[in-house]
Image (tube, rainbow, N blue to C red):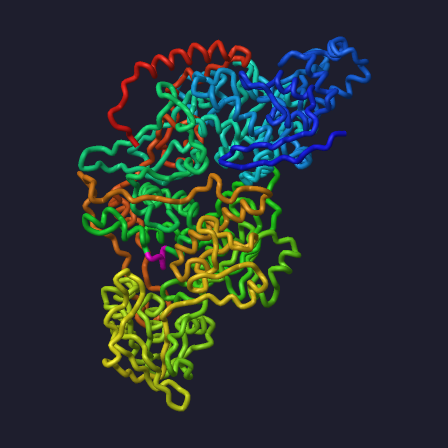
Amino acid sequence: MEEKKQPRIIGAGGMSAYDSHPEKVREPIIKLGQKITDRVGVKVTAQDPEYYGLAAMITDEMAEIALKMKLRTPYTLDQMAQMTGYDKKELEPLLFQMGYKGVLEFAYTKDTHERLYVLPVFVMGSAEYSNMRMGDLEEHPEMASFFERMTFLPLEKITPMVPPGGAGIGMHVIPVEKAIPNNAHSESIEHISHWLEKYEGRYAASPCSCRYGRSILKEGCADDPEDWCIAVGDMADFVVETDRGHYVDKEEVLRILKKAEDNGFVHQITNMDGEDKIIAICNCNVNICNALRTSQLFNTPNMSRSAYVARVESENCVACGKCVEFCPAGAVKLGQKLCTKNGPMKYPKHLLPDDNRWGKEMWDPDYRDNNRINCYDSGTAPCKTACPAHIAVQGYLKMAAQGRYRDALALIKKDNPFPAVCGRICNRQCEEACTRGTIDEAVAIDAVKKFIAQQDLNAETRYIPEVIIPSNRGPFKEKIAIIGAGPAGLSCAYYLACKGYYPTVFEKNEKPGGMLMYGIPSYKLEKDVIEAEIEVLKELGVTIQCNVEVGKDITLDELRAQGYQAFYIAIGAQKGRMPNIPGEDAENTMTAVSFLKEVHENKISQLNGRVVVVGGGNVAIDAARVASRIGGQNISMFALEQEKELPASKEEIMEAKEEDIQIHCGWGPKEVVVEDGKVKGIIFKKCIRVFDENGRFAPVYDENEVWQMDCEYVIFSIGQCNDYGDLLKGSKVTFGRGNCINADALTYQSEESDIFVGGDVYSGPRFAIDAIAAGKEGAESLHRYVHWNASLTIGRNRRDFKELDKNNIVIESYDNGCRQEAGMDESIDYRHSFQDAHKTLSEEQVKKETARCLGCGASIVDPNKCIGCGICTTKCEFDAIHLHRDLPEHSKMVVSEEKMKHILPYAAKRGLKIMFKKKPTTRVK
């Protein structure tokens, strides 16, 4: 036997190559590759995919047999024996092996079900078949490159000249059936139900060859590859006979199709046999699909698009962005609904090859990433843009206005699993950016969210999201460990559970919640609120193990030995910083973080004496107000910043002052005064500048101006830091500024490949909503990582949003109601109690407040990019986007053998259009 050289597979935006220098060229393979190549005018060599793909599949003897056959022509065993001169007993197992390898396909006579043998072209044909058994690909990885190249090379020059309908080439998008308007004319071939009825009872589910092949090329998408392709008719029998699939009934087919739609996969049918025949219905992920690539990489949607185009009804659209997230073609982006000072915003349309010269300069090799761009450069709703988690604010406000409170809660939880928590303690970046704030006051977004999220506090009304798994074989079995049960870790666990995992969260404290539980006082966030929303995670199958410190009680290596394949480190910045001044280690000095935690654990229940809190942020105010509630006297805060610069929120400052806490600005700690080992006071020095001319923290002091404050307790709230213990001992993890873990800015993968990080250990101390956003991204990375050879980055939603220009809008009319405030429960002594006295808006107030939203954003569809799959319509909960049969010519299906009859006339017409087209004076971007 000849020694087979291993391939050199190069991943480059979906393009691959194979380096082959065989010592002996196998001539029958060369001849067969030439016979069945899809490429026109190419002389096949040993360096071409036609050669190395076939060489990996079959013997020279098999190639000689195949050379006797005509393409796409069925032969009986008797006919094959007569053509080849083989004895039938010898020939039949050989032909079966050729089918098993994939160089032949089988058809069957209707009456006797006698097997017929067919020599297919490469696509659809042997290139796909060779990628449908993972064992074959592992033995011959060059076949993945073979498949990828044979779906690329034959099309790179001809694609712009292909007429609507695809001219019998490749695959054809077929819409989600429920997206086809009931009152619109449609052709039967545009309905999946038509094809299921045509092949009633002859279905087989088989693996996705694209998902398999792309995994070998290290560009997988982390879907479970099994059963996404539905073979029908003779093809169903073929894939079962050759161990490529298994029979399924119609009910199972419908279940697979529904699961595909839930995941945002595109239905496609084969396009080689005209209107009377298909061989398969595929459910395609654009990140790996070689067929969808034709319209995306080459920017030539004629190749595969359906007859339908999505259009947005702007008056119904609320820019929730879910259609954008799922659109496989990048045809939908967020824009604005408000007019500019020059009239309605105008959006560019993608150039098409129909009347433009086309070449590689018009391609988009990075289409899988560019299709995930969320909004136009001109921007969209500021609330969604400003929120770190990019929650669909406009969407849930509209649902609340319509009384659809459960739908509103479900929409919020697509991006934030803790709306009840955030409704109480969020820093409200959405409100700071709200366009309404340019007129009077921002919409009370957070207060409305709190009202909506009240449902989560009762087990009867709690929202448990549907688990949508990109697999047809049930939940994923891969084990993932999350270290730290704070908002980042719990959010990561939540989104992993929603995708079909059962993650385990390890928490060193007695209860989960992290700083939500141990760092935020109950008068702001009652602990039962946290516990209620954590219950949702438990119902989703998340396991939380408390009182387990990883690195001490168990190591990462021991968890690896238990089968854990990946880790998410989200332990938070749980340790307070000290100022490094004399006397800071005296008795009764402490950090705010430790003080708040010990009060929560009832380790500190009473203070007897005067208290000074050093710091000017929200945590400092929390410490001061808690100290007041447990007996502290003459509570004073000292901050470096002037009052207008204080990092604490205005609301927190106001409430602190109402509780008689004195705030002194412009002072930094110099020395703790100590007597008999205990605090006697603290000396401050005058701060004359906090930040330098570049905005960096660089305080400057006047050492000659000091202030001594007598006290019995000093609480430092000047920052937090990370305390890893032995968690990362022996790992490759490195650390950067602020002792934060170095990790990739997109994937959060550390230098130890199976360790991902999020929240404060990566970013430094931030707010809960930032940690929640990081947790969702961490879940996406972990999902991709634990699936063999899936890309961590390709086709990933970067979650980049841009704010519209609030200085260039015209607001002609709006509801002039004033901002609604919930107020305080006067039956509670909220100045001294640990009970949360903040009331929730009433339903009537919610109606008034949601009416104040200006509805800034809207989704915009580029019809030149839309492929008419209808996925967007299944994700819209506002009846704002629909399919329209604007391009009926795209439903024309012809047999592959007649493709040139359709391509040549179309190419001639196109050439004339280009020749006589007027050149634009400027190029529109």
- Identified at 52% across, 31% down, the residue is 289
The residues colored magenta run 423-427
x and y percent of residue 119 in the render? 65, 17
Type of secondary structure dominating the magenta stretch: helix
Count of picture labels: 0
- Identified at 55% across, 21% down, the residue is 270
Pick the quarter of the image with the N terminus: top right
x and y percent of residue 63 in the render? 70, 19
x and y percent of residue 233 in the render? 63, 19
The one nearer the camera, 809 or 703, is 703
Residue 709's place in the image compared with 869, above or below, is below
x and y percent of residue 879 in the render? 36, 32
Q: Is residue 712 magenta?
A: no
- Identified at 71% across, 25% down, the residue is 58
The one nearer the camera, 308 or 316, is 308
Residue that sits furthest to the bottom in the current view: 676
The one nearer the camera, 271 or 704, is 704
The one nearer the camera, 333 or 72, is 72
Q: Is residue 108 visible?
A: no
Q: Is residue 426 magenta?
A: yes
Q: Is residue 123 visible?
A: yes
Q: Image quarter for residue 768? A: bottom left
Residue 589's place in the image compared with 759, above or below, is below
Q: Say whether residue 324 is left or right of residue 28.
A: left
Q: Image quarter for residue 282? A: top right
Q: Say whether residue 523 is left or right of residue 597.
A: left
